[in-house]
Image (cartoon, helix red, strand yellow):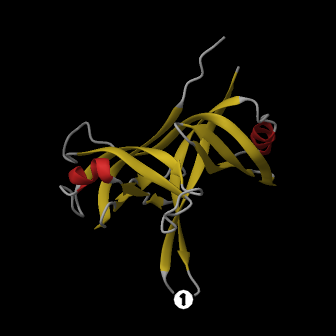
Amino acid sequence: MTTRRVNNKVRLAGQIVYIRFFDKTATVVVNTGASEDGIHSNYPRAVVFDKVLSVAHGFKVGDYVLIDATMQDNSNRANANLPPRTIAVNHMVRLNPESSEYRTANRFDFWCHVINIQKVSDNKAKATAVIYTGQLNYITVYYEAEPEKIDEFCEINNKNYVHLTGQIRTNRVLTSEGKIEFFDKLSVSNFRVVK
């Protein structure tokens, strides 16, 4: 019998463009630079909870930061103010952008089951990653690729264990009230069914 890896990792590195503190949380938005497609700049939003909140108080807009986090499903939580899913910060450290070792980062790494796979078009699919890390987390992911790869993705059985990697892309939306809002979308770049 093989042991299954449990992995729910998010890594962000870049410049803080927004930080706001609340009673027991803080919201941090990080400019992680251009996406893999080279078209978009991404600004993932992460939430800092009580165990890391004292560390977050040492940061301000303009600072460079490395964040290690997990993706958390909020659909069954009592706090209705949280979005459906949250990048929950586990660790954050200051970075020196002048260092030769400095690189921006924006990636997720999930070992999970994939359910509710829907082929949206010939080159797009949408699915739910199910990750158990003390609680069940249901995370919506998107996959864009050539039609053959989309077909392969859509054939994943919900009993299969799958390794997903990708990037958090930010979509800029103009609301009917004329406000600009940003929404994060988890974009799968690679998947592998684990036998």
Q: Residue furthest top?
A: 1
Residue at the image position 63 percent from the left and 48 percent from the top = 138
Q: Where residue 172 sits in the image (x, y, percent)?
A: 52, 70
Q: In the figure, residue 20 lies in which quadrant?
A: bottom left
Kind of residue sitting beneath label 1? Glu
Q: Residue furthest bottom?
A: 177
Q: In the picture provided, is 135 more to the left or to the right than 100?
A: right
For the N terminus, which image quadrant? top right
Q: Is residue 147 above or below residue 113?
A: below
Residue at the image position 39 percent from the left and 53 percent from the top = 32
Q: In the figure, residue 43 lies in which quadrant?
A: bottom left
User: Which residue occupies the foreground of this view, 134 or 114?
Assistant: 134
Mark 1, secondary structure of its residue: loop
Q: Where residue 75 sits in the image (x, y, percent)?
A: 59, 57
Q: In this figure, what is the number of numbered marks?
A: 1
Q: Residue furthest front?
A: 78
Mark 1 Cα within 10 Å, few/some/many (few <14, many 20+)? few
User: Which residue occupies the foreground of this view, 112 or 15?
Assistant: 112
Residue 107 seen by the camera: yes
Q: Where residue 18 sits in the image (x, y, percent)?
A: 32, 66
Residue at the image position 70 percent from the left and 40 percent from the top = 114
Q: In the picture provided, is 46 more to the left or to the right than 115?
A: left
For the C terminus, which image quadrant? top right
Residue at the image position 49 percent from the left and 83 percent from the top = 179
Residue 39 seen by the camera: no
Q: In the picture provided, is 147 more to the left or to the right than 23?
A: right
The residue beneath circle 1 is: 177
Q: Where residue 58 sits in the image (x, y, percent)?
A: 17, 55
